Every structure is written in C-alpha cells, then in structure tokens.
Image (spheres, rainbow, N blue to C red):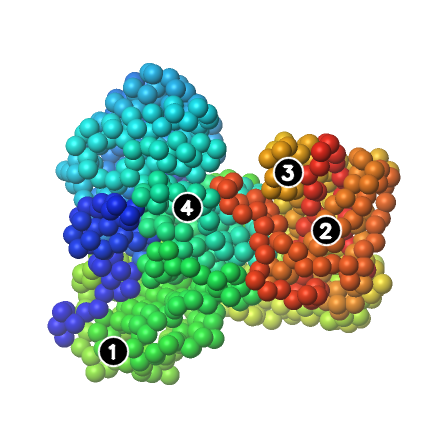
Amino acid sequence: MSCSLMVAPAAWSQQQAVPKGDVYVDKQGVLRWQKGKQEVALFGVNYTTPFAYSYRAHRRLGVSPEQAIEQDVYHLARLGVDAFRVHVWDVEITDTVGNLLENEHLRLLDFLVARLKERGIKIILTPIAYWGNGYPEPDTAMTGFSSIYDKGQAYTNPRAIAAQERYLTQFLNHRNTYTKQLNRQDPDIIACEVCNEPRYHEPAAQVTAFADRMAAAIRNTGCRKPVFYNIAENPQVHEAILNAKVDGLTYQWYPEGLVSGHTLRGNFLPYVDQYPIPYRQDKRFTSKAKMVYEFESADILQPIMYPAMARSFRAAGFQWATQFAYDPLAIAYANTEYQTHYLNLAYTPSKALSLLIAGQVFRQVKRGQATPAYPTDSTFGSFRISYREQLSEMNTPEAFYYTSTTRTEPRKPAALRHVAGVGSSPVVRYEGTGAYFLDQLAAGVWRLEVMPDAVQVEDPFAQASLRRTVTRIEWNTQPMQISLADLGQQFTVRGLNEGNAAQAQAANGAVAVHPGVYLLATSQQKTTVWTSQTRLGTLRLGEFVAPAPTVAGLQVVHKSYPQVAAGQPLRLTANVVGLAPTDSVLLVAQHYYGRTQTIPMQRGAYPLFEARVPAELLYPGQLRYWVVVKQGSKTTTFPGNVAGSPRQWDYAHPEHWETAIVPAAAPLPLFTAATDYDQVELGRIGEGSYADYVTSPATGALAVRLFGKPQTEAGAADNRPAMSLRAYFTDKVQGRHQDLLNSKELLLTGQASQPGTVIQVVLVTKDAAAYAATITLGTDHQTVRVPLTSFRPAPLLLSPRPYPSFLPLTFQPATQPPVLRLADAEVLQVVLPAAPAARHVDIGSVQLR
C-alpha cells in the first residue's frame, strides 16, 4: 500500500487548501491572497494561555503552558480551525513607556505562533489590549503603559500615544524565538488589528488622528500587511474610523449579551438571523475589508448557534471570524477563564463540532450571499440547523458531520471520506457522549478517533471557581457500530495512540472502543504501512489528546419538577456517573407522611437512569424522593452523597428532592419572583433603566422591579422599551402538559408606581414566534387576568440585548401562525415600554389557569 494513496482528514485537508503567503485588500475592499488572488475566508478562535489568568491558572495547577499549548492547538486543528486571533496583553510585555519586555509571556506567544504555523493556522494579532490582566481575579504584576493610562487617556494623552507607537514598532520588529522570523515579516501573521475595543467619544477628528498615527507606526516598520481597526465598539463615532487610513474594519457579536450567570435556554436562532451594519452602503465602508475579531453565543451550550452565525457573517461580507475564546484543556473542567464562554472539544463536544461545521459554512457560503429569514433559512446548501432537534449538520458527498443524534442519511454513503459526530447516525451508532472522527486513509482503511465521555454536572455559566467541576470526563468503554461501504462488517481494529494496544475484530460492524485512536481496515488490506508516526498533513496518525478521568466518585445530577399533575404518569430521570457495570440505582419515593416505595431505576442512554413513580403516590400533596446507589454491600443516597438509605430507621440526613402534586384546577406557574430570581434574564434596554428585587408592601412577598428612566428623544425615535424580563418556563410545566393545553387565561400579579401603567406580556414558542397582550397596572397590588385569546402575533424582542448596540432589537418572521399554539410556548417576556416620566412595575408572579 503506497502512502501516496492517503487522503487527508477533512480538518487538515481544509487547512492544506489555504494558500501560503501574504494578503492584500483590493479596491473593492476584498481581502485576497497575494498568490492566486483568491478571496480569503478564514474561521477560528481566540486563545489566551500565554497571558493573564489563563497563564496563572496553568501554573497554579502545575501544568506546563508549553504542553497545554501543544495539546490545545492539536484540538483546534482537529476542529478544522484555520484562523487564530488574540489581543496581546501589552500590560504584561511592556514597560510604562512602551518598551517591549523579553519575558515569559512574550516567549509563550512566540511558542504558540510557532505551533499554529505547524498546523497551517493563519494568525491576526492585536498588539494593544488596554486590559488589566486579572479577570476573573484582581489585577496583578502589571508593568505596561496600560497599567497607568486608561482607555480614555490612551488616545488623548501624548505620553500614552508615544508609548503605543514605541511598543508597536518594537512588537512588529520582534523576532520570534522559535521561528526566527520578525512578526512583521511572518507570512502566517497575515494582518494586524491595532487595538482591542478602544473607548472613544466626540470630537471625531481626534479619534481619526489617533487611528492614523497607530497605523502609520505599523507601516513605518516596513510592515506591508493590512491594518485593521475596531469600529463596532464606539458606534457613536464610527465616522472617525471610516475616515481613518486603515485597510480593514473589525466587529464583534454577542447576540444575547454576556454574563447572565446561568445557562440561557430557548430558541435564540432569530438573534443571529442577520448582522446588518447601518452604514453598509457607505463607500468608505465598502472599500475596506471586514473582520469579526470576537464572537460567541454567550451562556448557551446549544450546538446550533455557530453555524447560523457563520452564515450571517458571510451574508454581511466578513472574511475572517474568530470565536472568543477557546477554553484551554487544563482548566475547561471548571470554565473559569471566562465563565460566559465555554468551548472545548473534550468538555463541550457538541458545541465544538458545531464550530467545525460553522467553519465549513464560512468557507462554503459566498461572501455577500443573501439568505431568507428564519425559520426558512434553517436548511441551506449542505447544512441543516434544528432548534427542536438541537442539531447542526453538514452533509456533502464526501463528509458527514453532526452535533447530536440524527436520522439524516448521508448524501452519498459510498463516497464518504470523513465523518465527525456526537451521538448516533445511520453511519455510526454510539452510546458515549464524547466526539468521534472517522477519516478514510485509503479504500478500506480508516482512522477512528474517540474522545472520552463528557457529562455536565453543574451549570457552566454560574459562579466560576477552580474548585468547582462543571463537566466530568469519564473514560468508559462504549459499544460502537460502524456502517461504511468500503469497510464492511468484519473489519479489524488496531490501537494507534501511545499506550493503546487494542486488537479486535468487528462483528456485524460492532466493536467496543475506549477513548483513543484506532486503525480500522478490511481483512484484505495490509496495514503495516500505517503506524502511529505516519505523517498525514499536519498530524501524525497516533496523535491523541484527552483529559484524564475526573476523580470525583459517585455523582447524581437531577432537577425536580416544581409541580406535577395529580393522577398523571410521572417519569423521573437522573444522570448518574461514577458507576461500575454491576452497580444498581434505586428511586425511593414517599408521599410525605404517607406510603414509601422503592423502585429500580432503569439504564437509559448513558448516563441516564429513569423510573416511573407508582400511581398510588400521585394524589395531591407533596412527593419527596431520593436516588440510592448500591455498590455491593455499600449504599449511598443522593442528594447529599450520604452513606446509607432513607429507608433505614437512623438515616438522619435532611436533604431530599420534592415536587408538588397539584389538581388540574391549580394555576400553572410561568414565573415566581420568590423562587426564580437566579434563572431569569432582566434586560436593560433604555439608558439608565434597571431591575431589582423588592418585597411587596401589600404582601411582603418578593417581586422583581422593572424601573424605566424617562424616555429621551433618541429612545422616542426607535420606540425602544425601557426594561424586560425573560423567563424560560418549559421545566415548570413539563409535569402538567394536559393542564397547559387546557389553560384559558394568564394571571399576572403586581403593581405599578404610576396609575394606568401599561406593560406588554409576551409568550414565545419553540419556533421563536411571539404573541403579545397588553396589561394595565395600577398602584394597588392586584392580579390581572388576560384571556389567552387576547394574544396576537407581535415582533419578538431580542432580550438579552444583542451587542454591538447597532444590531436589531426585534425580530419579525416572514410568516407566523395567526393563533398562539400553547403547546409550543416556552418563554415568557414582560416588557416595560419607555415613557416620558420615570416609573416602575413590580411583578410577583405570572401564571396560567
């Protein structure tokens, strides 16, 4: 078998197609490669291990930053990343007058650049960050000019300006310790973005003058690479940057804001339906290249956002887009670097594969290609995005990628060369939760890479701490059945990565696999030519990187229903990790002082266990229950991870789960201020408006206060509301589905500071169709009843508010059913409109009856 027959895996074949050498911006504002003149289309991530908190955290955990960088860059290459950007923490590599310091942080940046180049990943650096180096900790040991000049001074203080000019000159003339190339000459550093998220105000002329001086400082070094400049951070002075002597403009996108403190749920695809730039017809804009330096679907784990964002980026004309920020493997278990961001191949496998698919979207969709509005844009080209299935797919004759279990058939099974997935498909049936990759090396010979199981055990977007594990890694042996035309059903399996001595024969396409890399081959193929050291594009066949198993013992993850309907079937589920195959799981359920029963829980798809509560326990009242794990003679009860069983006479641990069993006539809670305060989104839209939690003077119960400042002329022009409350309520009504369908009216309890205050109540469906009704509140505490027949189709308020602020605040689908289908409703919004005078409303609860 000749090595010349090898076919590079998809990720590396994409990178090999990237031209080498420098780029330029043509007269139409298109970024092109110098050789061949093709348009640039590069997609990837930011990554920060050489600097700031990430650097300190690695040192604190005893992890070599060099080893971490090598491991993470391998995973980035495996995900098809071909673009890298980072804002350099100048505060750590300069002195106060702008001299470059040859220190550990600069050396590690050099090391990172060298490793990225080896994988064919192109680079844009932002030399000036203006940031302190602390987040999420206090700032520490900062030596640079940004430690004494804030953003407002950076472009107005002559000493600050001189320091930045000096630093840019020395940074671009810095010779990389590993590649021996000057930064300004390295062909893989294709451009330079001057500074990260500056803060400007009028007059615009001063802003333009500063941008021109920074661009001149770069060009005076002899650097001929395109110079990009941030325009999105200060939309009020965008004219100043349009007038600047720069080659490109940079933007960011946080479509549902940042730092909610919990996982956002619901359909956010309308939030990323388009990226309209207000001045997109301006000739000063069209003559410049466009780059997205940062983007993220913040506080969202759904594997559907990145491909939709990539499509919208291309429609807006962007040629570079880099997510912020890829989590280093060593600290991704805790998601401490930036708690509102979470992306790592091992720890967020479905979201990571959505990045792989998004990269293909970015390269395959033409720049400026228009797309129809959501939801008709959910299938385009070779791609499909489904909120209801929590699925992104790419399906071409040669490649089939999917983020979750899918029933879609590959377009041409016999032509497949690359498969990547999480869950199962017609090609691969797999019971694990980690990602896997299949790449054809030759006819009848495939490379299989299997990542370990990842199990989320805490909300990754809540308060961060290195002492808090949010995702567990489990190295389980899982069954896998593979259906590939050229491989057949009786192929051989041989381990390739270090320490993997597996040798097996598949039966009917099925084999048990442990995390690692394998060579799969038909019996007719001679495989001795394929070794762990065989080079294939930018990788060796035996390369494998995965975190060690989490050392945490038994763990049960369960969230109880607030209410369930009396007499209706009730199925309780829990994720249980840390089990051996011989262990058993039991549900102990009790109708408070009534009868107690023990029910075996059945294994479902890993790591799920489930049990049905007996009907005799489901009469109105309070159900409380425990999950008990039996391991031989040892018994452990959850919640609490306590030895023993609640059925023992001396079991004294007070924790338990509970749910209310209610009759059909009981109201359905959509929002209750007293219990939901940490699981709602309170969106400030009007300038100076805010939200708070207060106690009602009438009842003493907790209420959420939406406070609106007086409407300004600017607010009047676009009719923006002042404040909004958003609550995802599917979990609350899951145990009362029939009661939901039978509901006739909405009940809102609250009061206003001014008589006759009008608010809008909105119900949003799984398909992001919004239906609104208006309510008038007085100054007395009251319960207002609104017939559900009063709800009418309305624009969806995009709250939390998208950033940057020039993006649309509402979304209106092209078509929408005229009547609300209550079975599909999942989100409540309460909107306080802007008004000439300051006022507030206090909302205690919203229910259906």
Q: Quadrant of residue 754?
A: top right
Mark pair 2, 1: CA separation: 59 Å
Residue 475 in view, yes or no: no
Q: Is residue 129 above or below residue 842?
A: above
Question: Looking at the rendered structure, which numbered label has been put on residue 716?
Answer: 3
Residue at x-position 69% and y-position 35%: 708
Q: Which residue is mark 2?
A: 761
Mark pair 4, 3: CA separation: 24 Å
Q: Residues within 10 Å of mark 3 (few under 14, many from 20)?
A: few
The type of residue carrying mark 3 is Ala
Residue at x-position 14% and y-position 38%: 180
Q: Residues within 10 Å of mark 2 (few under 14, many from 20)?
A: many
Mark pair 3, 2: CA separation: 21 Å
Q: Which residue is mark 4?
A: 280
The type of residue carrying mark 1 is Gly
Question: Looking at the rendered structure, which numbered label has been put on residue 606?
Answer: none
Mark pair 4, 1: CA separation: 51 Å
Q: In the rendered structure, which disc, 2 or 1, sits on the residue that comes first in sequence?
A: 1
Question: Looking at the rendered structure, which numbered label has been put on residue 444?
Answer: 1
Q: Residues within 10 Å of mark 4 (few under 14, many from 20)?
A: few
